[in-house]
Amino acid sequence: MSPFDHPEGELTRRSFLGTTAAAAWGLGPAAEGLAASGTDQALLIDCHVHLKHGDAAGTEWSAESIVELMDDVGIARSIVFAMKTTTVRSIEMAAAAVEKYPDRLIPFLYGLPSYEIALLPVVEQAVTQKGFRGIKLHVGECTLADYVIDPLLRLAGTFPIPCLVDVAGNAAVATRLAKTFPQTPFWFAHMGRYNSTDAVMTDQFIRLAEEFDNVWLDLSAVGLPAKIGEAVARVGARRLVWGTDGPYKNPTAPEYARAQLDNVRKLDISDADKGLILGGNVARLLNLN
Ligand SMILES: [Zn+2]
């Protein structure tokens, strides 16, 4: 039994967010119905979309171009965030995008601990007053050492809001986080590492999700798509979340997104499980309707 499936008594700040415990973890009938309706009818929700990438060029995508791509591919909603910038700027960028498309885009902020600002009040304000629903962390731009990131991860657990964390394959760090912050939902990006073909490392992340109820695996840019089916069998569909890590023009943005979609659609699993992975889980966890 997971505190995230049975949240009563587990949440500490539900009144702070002005929501009920059940709502906070999305146990409402709408999310379940969405998941159960099969992949053809189920709403697709992309859990990993960049307003600004972490690549060398810091490639930016406008809200308009992202929604145009979503329309092309049939994606109902996307979690959006900016990287390679400050936390404050990431909040400005995602807030502006969501203001244009409140029914399509879901804002996450970029959690980048810094000595320039007191980060925690900024994050708290974004979550409680600006509707931010989660945090993106990336080891490429900040260390995941405990003295740097632990205050932020502890804060995330008090709401609670999910942390989409790219640990670049470091299973030891991921294990420490899952163990240290049982109230914080971790979505580990790319099932461990971006486009990695390291089967041993990928297995470590599947095992981590088996062991810890607060661990989800983000299926964007997974280098060994066959491992996704293995993860469904071992972890269960309820703790896998589909995403694209796009937009990428590889070769075109819609083709890239459809290839990411095929990684799940082509699996030999039930339509109900596909529905959970492709959107039902995020809808439930974020209480979307
Ligand atoms: Zn990414």
Image: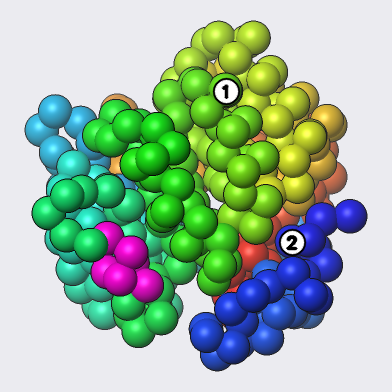
Determine the secondary structure under disc 1: helix
The image shows residue 261, relative to residue 36, as above or below, that is: above
The amino acid type found where label 2 is placed reads Phe
The image shows residue 61, relative to residue 119, as above or below, that is: above
Q: Residue at x 25, y 77 (%)?
A: 100
Residue 241 in percent (x, y) is at 61, 47
Along the horizontal axis of the image, is 263 left or right of 130? right
Residue 240 figure quarter: top right
Task: Reply yes or no: does residue 161 show up in magenta.
Answer: no
Residue 161 in percent (x, y) is at 53, 64
Determine the secondary structure under disc 2: loop
Q: Residue at x 49, y 21 (%)?
A: 169
Q: Residue at x 14, y 38 (%)?
A: 58
Instruction: Name the main secondary structure of what is drawn in magenta.
Output: helix
The amino acid type found where label 1 is placed reads Ala
**Is residue 134 visible to the viewer in this orientation of the structure?**
yes
- Residue marked by disc 2: 4
Q: Residue at x 44, y 37 (%)?
A: 146
